[in-house]
Each structure stands twice: as structure tokens, then as C-alpha cells.
């Protein structure tokens, strides 16, 4: 009986030592990157849309107006048909990034998704942000402009630090370019 108890205690010590040794095994730089990156998050803090006329359209409109004769009296001015001017829309996003990792990453790639009112994806961008100065547990605001967006009333934007990133997509994420030796 005493022999069985000693054997059981010895076995428990060996198993415990193996678990500790396995848990303390040094992780590869890629494993460390994946683990640290999973502790980053992003959220949208607001956005606004800026619409500017295309430069070519403005020049054409000025040429057309310069060629029109000026009326000498107020009553002679005819209402001209105003053609719609093509605009380019720029969306300005405010994004909050935070992490709860003990080791800061130099930067993370954030997925920005443009959705319609029914939450159907209209477009997607991957943007790398320098996070070397983001302190643990302190959200930091970043601003980013997306040019040429086909924004319509009711559309929205979502942001995320995706996790996990499938191996086949890691080439699209700057932080995976050189995870270390």
C-alpha cells in the first residue's frame, strides 16, 4: 500500500515536471507574434465623408462658363442647365487601437470593411498602423483617410485586428513579413 502511494506521488511529480517543462518551452518568433497580435483590438470611433469635385470636371465647368456670353440686363439671363459634377469621396475614419500584451508590436494590420445598410460587404482594405507607442491597456486613436470610396447614405465601416490569420493570407499583413530569426 505504501509502495503504491509512493509510486502515485512519484508519477504525479514526473507529470507535473513534464507539464511545467512543456509550458515553459521557448516559443518561436512566429508563435510569439501570433500570440501577441491576438491581444490587439481595433474599433471604429467615428467617420465622416468628404466629397470633392474631380479636378477635370472643375476645369471643364470653368471653360464652359468662360465661353458663355454675359447678359447686359438682369432679365436676359437664361437659366442654364446644370450638369452634375462627378465627385470623389474621401472617408476619414477615427480608429481606436489597444492591446493587453506584455510585449508591444511595432505595428499591426487592421482590416477596414465598408458595408451597406444591410451589412453586406462593399469593399475591404488592410492598413498597417505603427503601434510602437501604444501602451498596454491605453486605447490610442488613429485617423486614416480612404480615397475614392463609393459611399452612399446608410453605409458604415467596421474595423478589426483579425485573429487568426490563415497562413495563406499572412503575406497581406506587414507584421508577418519578418517575424524574427
Image: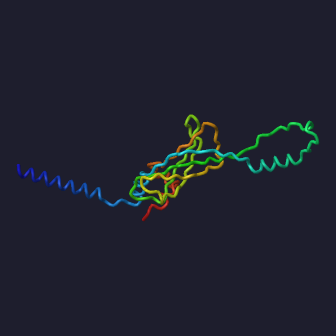
**Residue occupying the point 49% across, 57% down:** 131
In the rendered image, the vertical position of residue 84 relative to residue 29, given as above or below: above
Q: Nearer the viewer, residue 60 or 20?
A: 60
Q: For the view shown, which residue lies furthest in the front direction?
A: 74
- Left or right relative to 149: residue 74: right
Q: Residue furthest top?
A: 118
Residue at the spot 92% in from the left edge and 36% down from the top edge: 75
| Colouring | rainbow
Q: Position of residue 152 (x, y in %)?
A: 64, 39
Residue 99 image offset from top left, x and y in percent: 43, 52
Give the camera-side residue of 137 and 39.
Answer: 137
Q: Quadrant of the C terminus?
A: bottom left
* Number of dots carrying numbers: 0
Query: x, y (%) of residue 63?
Result: 85, 49
Looking at this rendering, what residue extends furthest in the right direction? 72
- As drawn, is 152 to the left or to the right of 46? right
Taking the image as shown, residue 9 lies to the left or right of residue 158, namely left
Residue 7 in the image: state x and y as whole percent: 11, 53
Residue located farthest toward the left when viewing the structure as drawn: 1
* 6, above or below 116, in the image: below
Left or right of 110, for residue 17: left
Relative height, residue 175 to residue 159 (above, below): below
Q: Residue at x 16, y 53 (%)?
A: 11
8, above or below 76, in the image:
below
Amino acid at each position: 500500500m505504501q509502495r503504491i502511494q509512493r509510486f502515485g506521488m512519484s508519477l504525479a511529480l514526473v507529470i507535473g515536471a513534464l507539464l511545467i517543462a512543456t509550458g515553459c518551452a521557448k516559443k518561436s518568433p512566429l508563435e510569439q507574434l501570433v500570440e501577441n497580435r491576438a491581444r490587439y483590438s481595433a474599433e471604429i470611433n467615428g467617420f465622416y465623408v468628404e466629397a470633392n469635385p474631380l479636378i477635370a470636371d472643375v476645369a471643364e465647368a470653368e471653360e464652359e462658363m468662360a465661353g458663355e456670353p454675359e447678359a447686359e440686363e438682369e432679365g436676359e439671363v437664361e437659366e442654364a442647365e446644370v450638369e452634375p459634377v462627378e465627385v470623389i469621396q474621401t472617408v476619414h475614419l477615427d480608429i481606436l487601437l489597444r492591446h493587453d500584451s506584455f510585449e508591444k508590436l511595432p505595428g499591426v494590420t487592421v482590416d477596414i470593411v465598408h458595408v451597406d445598410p444591410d451589412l453586406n460587404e462593399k469593399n475591404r482594405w488592410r492598413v498597417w498602423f505603427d503601434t510602437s507607442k501604444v501602451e498596454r491597456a491605453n486605447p490610442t486613436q488613429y485617423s486614416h483617410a480612404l480615397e475614392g470610396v463609393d459611399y452612399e447614405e446608410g453605409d458604415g465601416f467596421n474595423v478589426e485586428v483579425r485573429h487568426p490569420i490563415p497562413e495563406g493570407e499572412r503575406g497581406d499583413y506587414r507584421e508577418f513579413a519578418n517575424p524574427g530569426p
